[in-house]
Every structure is written in C-alpha cells, then in structure tokens.
Amino acid sequence: MNLKLLPLTSVATLNFSENHWLARLAAVILTAMPTYPIYLNLCNKKALVVGAGQVAARKAQALSRAGASILVVAREYSAEFNDICKHIQLERIEGDYSPEYLDDATLAIAATDDSELNTRIYNDCRARNVLCNVVDVPHLCDFYVPAVINHGDLTISIGTSGKCPAYAGRLRRKLESIITPDHGAFLEVLESARQKVITSDLTAQQRKKLLHHLAADTSFTLFRQQGADAWLKWADQQISASR
Ligand SMILES: C[C@@]1(CC(=O)O)C2=NC(=C\c3[nH]c(c(CCC(=O)O)c3CC(=O)O)Cc3[nH]c(c(CC(=O)O)c3CCC(=O)O)/C=C3\N/C(=C\2)[C@@H](CCC(=O)O)[C@]3(C)CC(=O)O)/[C@H]1CCC(=O)O
Ligand SMILES: NC(=O)c1ccc[n+]([C@@H]2O[C@H](COP(=O)([O-])OP(=O)(O)OC[C@H]3O[C@@H](n4cnc5c(N)ncnc54)[C@H](O)[C@@H]3O)[C@@H](O)[C@H]2O)c1
C-alpha cells in the first residue's frame, strides 16, 4: 500500500495499534496542524450525538444553543445526561449505534466509552463526508469544540488545539469576569445603530470612522451608565454630526 496516497487521518485510523509508530506519527502531525476557526450556522441541520454520558450532554447543550436538530443514540442515558438536557429539544433513540443514523447529518459527535466504536463512527463519517468529533481523541476530530462565552449574539471562544482543554476552560472563567452580559446588550444597540449608519449617505471612510467611534470603550461606558435609550439618542446625534 502506498501510504503517501492516504490522507493522514486514514493513517491514524488504519488497523494499527494505537501505539504503532505510523499511527502515533499521524496523530502528532494532525494535532500540530493549525485549525480554521469558524462559527457554523447549524440551524435546522442534523447533528448526531452517539452516547449519553456527561460529555455527550455538554456537547448536546452547545449544539442546542446553535439550533441544531439533534439526534442522540445511546444504549443507556445517564442521570447526568437526563438532568443537563432536560430542557433541550432532541430526538432520542435507545439502542446500539448504526451508520444509518448518520444519514443527512452535517456533523457527528462520538461520545461513547468504547474506543473501537468511536473509531468506527469516525470512519463512517469520513466515508459519508460528515464532520466528526470523537470527544477526547484529538487525532479523530475534524473539529475541536472550544470553551465558549455567550451573551446573546456575542460569542467568544477559546481553543488550544487540543493542547490543554482544562486551560481553555480556566481562561473562559477568567474572561467571564471581563466580558459581561452588558457587552452582549451593547452589541444589540450597536447593531441597531449600525443599520442606520450603513443605510445612510455617508462615505465608506466616514462610516468606518463612525462605527469605530460607536464601538469604542467611551461609548460602552456611556451605554453602561445611561442605558439603551439614552445611548441610542446619543448615537443618532453622532450619525447626524458625521454628515
Ligand atoms: C473546551 C472543552 C469544550 C467541551 O468539551 O465542551 C473541551 N474539553 C473541555 C474540558 C475538559 N476535557 C477534559 C478535561 C479533563 C482535564 C484534562 O484531561 O485536560 C476537561 C476539563 C474539565 O472537565 O474541566 C478531558 C479531555 N479532553 C480532551 C482530551 C484528550 C487529550 O487531551 O488528548 C482529554 C483527556 C481525556 C483523558 O482523560 O484521557 C480533548 C478535547 N477536549 C476538547 C474540548 C477538544 C479540544 C479543545 C481545545 O483544546 O481547544 C478536544 C480535542 C476534543 C473535543 O472533545 O472536542 C471543555 C472545556 C469547556 C469549558 O470549561 O468551557
Ligand atoms: N466524563 C468526563 O469528564 C470524561 C473525562 C475524560 C474523558 N472522558 C471520556 O469521554 C468519553 C465519554 O465520557 P462520558 O463520561 O460522557 O461517558 P459515559 O461512560 O457516561 O457514557 C458512555 C455512553 O456511551 C453509550 N454507548 C456505549 N456503547 C454504545 C453503543 N454501541 N451504541 C450506542 N451507545 C453506546 C453508553 O450507553 C453511554 O450512554 C469516554 O471515552 C470517556 O473515557 C470523559
């Protein structure tokens, strides 16, 4: 077999033992590659979650926030899963994983405690061009799930490319004391002011300058101290004064 022709991810999942030098080499190269951070729109797109333990629950929660249409397949649903996901809309199948569950899926999360099965799910995903995340196995991930701060439409995500997820979590908690719900609320008024700016007769240069002025720290301080209504009036004045 000509290994040069195989994608690295396939090398990582060939029937070598986890410790075979080729599998280890592929894992090292794959996890050393930089990732491409994007915010996926998963609204009404199917996401398959296999397994229903604590980790599956955390991933299902994040998928649900993005409006994904979630299908969970698990032999058993843990009490933690049921508790964390009690208010989440998802379809549940109690039973063994089967590749048909991947039909029409945009992405899949393999979160079982059976590493052979997780690898099989990853290979089934590759055969169907479904993006796959095998929790806790970086070299079997087409994408990593980051640590996230969400305030409305404001999203901050922290990734360590699998180097230390616990550190991503710690940084999230640290940033949570700096990026507050007020920042999310500020984004709402900014959006409303921006609509006025981009539909105005200002030049591109004037718009850019104004939008940066509206998004500045001094503007945020005014919003925090005086509230949304006062800020929107002030923003209207700034738009008029820019003409
Ligand atoms: C960010 C977060 C999102 C989420 O899962 O929701 C996330 N893991 C979180 C927490 C966490 N995970 C683990 C611990 C225990 C401490 C520890 O072992 O470090 C803690 C800490 C805790 O529980 O506090 C165990 C663990 N995780 C991975 C490995 C394998 C390895 O390291 O090789 C092992 C060892 C397993 C073993 O025991 O063998 C791998 C992955 N975990 C990822 C994401 C992806 C990389 C993301 C990145 O680096 O950017 C990746 C590659 C795949 C994936 O799962 O997507 C979430 C924090 C959420 C938050 O706090 O906001
Ligand atoms: N929970 C953690 O904090 C943690 C930390 C580090 C690593 N991990 C790893 O993450 C993975 C998931 O952990 P967890 O604690 O959420 O899992 P868990 O052990 O609580 O749950 C595993 C799930 O997989 C399901 N499952 C097993 N075989 C199946 C099959 N053939 N078809 C369908 N479902 C099947 C089980 O029914 C169960 O719902 C494991 O590999 C674990 O080693 C977890």
Image (tube, grey):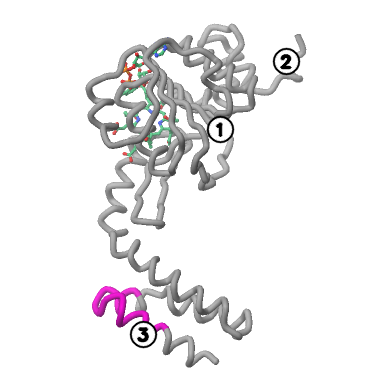
Q: Which residue is mark 3?
A: 233
Of circles 2 and 1, the one toward us is 1
Rounded to the nearest angstrom, the CA distance separating label 1 from label 3 is 44 Å
* Residue 127 image offset from top left, x and y in percent: 65, 19
Which numbered disc, 2 or 1, marks the residue that appears first in the sequence? 2
Q: Quadrant of residue 63?
A: top left
Q: Amino acid at mark 2?
A: Leu
Of circles 3 and 2, the one toward us is 3
Q: Residues within 10 Å of mark 3 (few under 14, many from 20)?
A: few
* Residue 97 image offset from top left, x and y in percent: 46, 13
Q: Compare residues 243 and 101 and report the one nearer the observer.
A: 101
Q: Which residue is mark 2?
A: 3
Rounded to the nearest angstrom, the CA distance separating label 2 from label 1 is 29 Å
Q: State left or right for residue 92 relative to residue 204.
A: left
What is the number of the mark on residue 106?
1
Query: In the figure, 7 relative to 89: above or below?
Result: above
Q: Amino acid at mark 3?
A: Lys
Q: Residue at x 35, y 51 (%)?
A: 150
Q: Residue at x 42, y 47 (%)?
A: 157
Label 1 residue SS: strand
Specify the principal SS of the magenta part.
helix
